[in-house]
Image (spheres, rainbow, N blue to C red):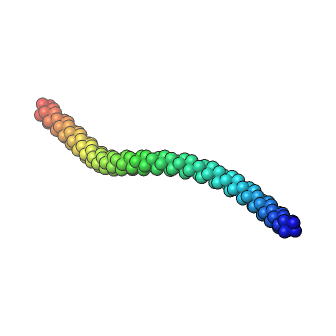
Amino acid sequence: MRSLANEMIKIRDKLTERENDITKSNEIIKKMNKDCKHLASKVRTYETELQENKNLNASNLLKIENLNNELKQNKNELEEIKNINKEIHHELSEKTNRIDELTEKEQTSQNVIAWLHKQLNEMQVSHQVIRYNKQVENKSVSMYLFNAIS
């Protein structure tokens, strides 16, 4: 019976040892489950952040595309404005040249008018001198006739 009792003690000791091992294993499993839950929570958080970043990136890409389109439109408008500006400068240059030509023609016309006035005045003075000479001549003839008659 001793051997049975010894065996029972050995079995009980092994059973206690196995119980302790199982308890330790259960504690390790609980700790690993807790770690897994913590890691799963982190993964969900990272997935949420990743999705938010994807959404933000998509939003930013859309904004960039819109800004690029706006930039292209602004460049086109700027080019149109530059072309209009060139046309306006060209028109201004033509009109300035035309004004210069007209100013020159006006000055020439004024010079011609002044010359014509001078010619007219000279002709009027000539006619007055001729009339005066005729009057003097007529008076001389009249005096001669008067003297001849008397």
Q: Quadrant of residue 141?
A: top left
36 or 82: which is nearer to us? Answer: 36
Which quarter of the rendered picture does the C terminus lie within? top left
Q: Measuring 34% from the left and 47% from the top, which residue is drawn there?
A: 87
78 or 26: which is nearer to us? Answer: 26
Residue 62 seen: yes
Residue 118, image x, y percentages: 26, 45
Q: Measuring 36% from the left and 48% from the top, which residue is drawn there?
A: 83
- How many badges with numbers are in the image? 0
Q: Quadrant of residue 147?
A: top left
Residue 103, image x, y percentages: 32, 47
Residue 61 horizontal side relative to residue 22, left or right: left
Residue 130 horizontal side relative to residue 90, left or right: left
Q: Quadrant of residue 27?
A: bottom right
Residue 137 horizontal side relative to residue 7, left or right: left
Residue 127, image x, y percentages: 20, 39
Q: Measuring 17% from the left and 37% from the top, which residue is drawn there?
A: 134
Determine whether 52 is above or below 132 in the image: below
94 or 31: which is nearer to us? Answer: 31
Farthest residue, direction top: 149
Farthest residue, direction front: 1
Residue 116, image x, y percentages: 24, 43
Residue 59 horizontal side relative to residue 73, left or right: right
44 or 122: which is nearer to us? Answer: 44
Which quarter of the rendered picture does the N terminus lie within? bottom right
Residue 118 seen: no
Q: Measuring 57% from the left and 47% from the top, which residue is drawn there?
A: 55
